Amino acid sequence: MPTKAKLYISWIAAAGLIVLVAGLSRWQSTGLRRLLAFLFLAMLLSTQKIRLPGMKGTMSLSFPFILVGIADFGFGETLLLGCTAAFVQTLWHAKTPPKPEQIVFNMATLVLSAGCADWLSHATLRLVHLNSLVLLLASASLIYLLLNTGLVAGVISLAEEKPFQREWLHCFYWAFPYFLVGAVAAGLVSTLNQSGSWVAGLLVLPLIYLCHFWYQIHVERAVRVQAAVPGSDEISAVLVQD
């Protein structure tokens, strides 16, 4: 691995650790039973992964729960959700045993993405004096998506010496539909949480899994189509900048 990539991973790991320590040091509990339930579900659903075309990394079902954390949980609780989900996602049924730096980087990436999305989305709504769940989740989703795909594209660009812009567009292209559906699912869960018992929010779980299943089929079909069409490499380059 190039030295620049190693330094990049070290910087991201250090930044993620600082954010995690800062969040946990100001812990505000919103309910232990609910946190443990959502933590367990985030870990469980992190095992449901989709491998995106042309990428070594994966996406999991943990994203909607991180958004729910941003809407309904404390800052430290949200970071804990993201950190734990990343740990399980990295280790569960990995094709090759992940290296320590991969585990640390993935955890730091989710911590930074979740932390920045949480802080910036709440700060923005306070600045404009609004209290809207829709705007909160929309802004948090966009910030999370931009930062998460940017951090991942950064390490790929440095490690494989590829143009950052093309790698970021590739990540963004494939991740955007998944994140969009995840944001809608998180909105439903959070709405049910705020309107009654938090257990009612878990009724959305089958919908989240169906969306995950649909997107997995969509990705596999897109890969087969590109592989079957002559000149699909050129088509892929135009679409996803890879």
Image (cartoon, rainbow, N blue to C red):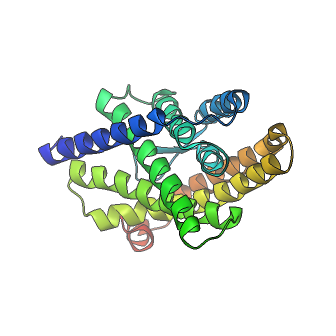
Residue 4 as seen in the image, left or right of residue 26: left
Number of disc labels:
0
Q: Position of residue 202 (x, y in %)?
A: 79, 40
Quadrant for the N terminus, please. Answer: top left
Q: Is residue 173 visible?
A: yes
Asked whether 4 or 131 is in front, the reply is 131
Residue 122 as seen in the image, left or right of residue 215: left
Q: Quarter of the image holding residue 90?
A: top left
Which residue shows up at 68% across the image and 34% down it? 38
Q: Position of residue 27 (x, y in %)?
A: 53, 34
Considering every residue shown, the one lying at the far left of the view is 3
Quadrant for the C terminus, please. Answer: bottom left
Q: Position of residue 28 (x, y in %)?
A: 58, 36
Residue 89 as seen in the image, left or right of residue 195: left
Relative to 72, is 101 above or below? above
Asked whether 216 or 136 is in front, the reply is 136
Relative to 99, is 113 above or below? below
Q: Position of residue 112 (x, y in %)?
A: 41, 47
Asked whether 152 or 130 is in front, the reply is 130
Asked whether 237 or 20 is in front, the reply is 20
Which residue shows up at 49% across the image and 55% down it? 119
Q: Is residue 228 visible?
A: no
Which residue shows up at 71% across the image and 29% down it? 37
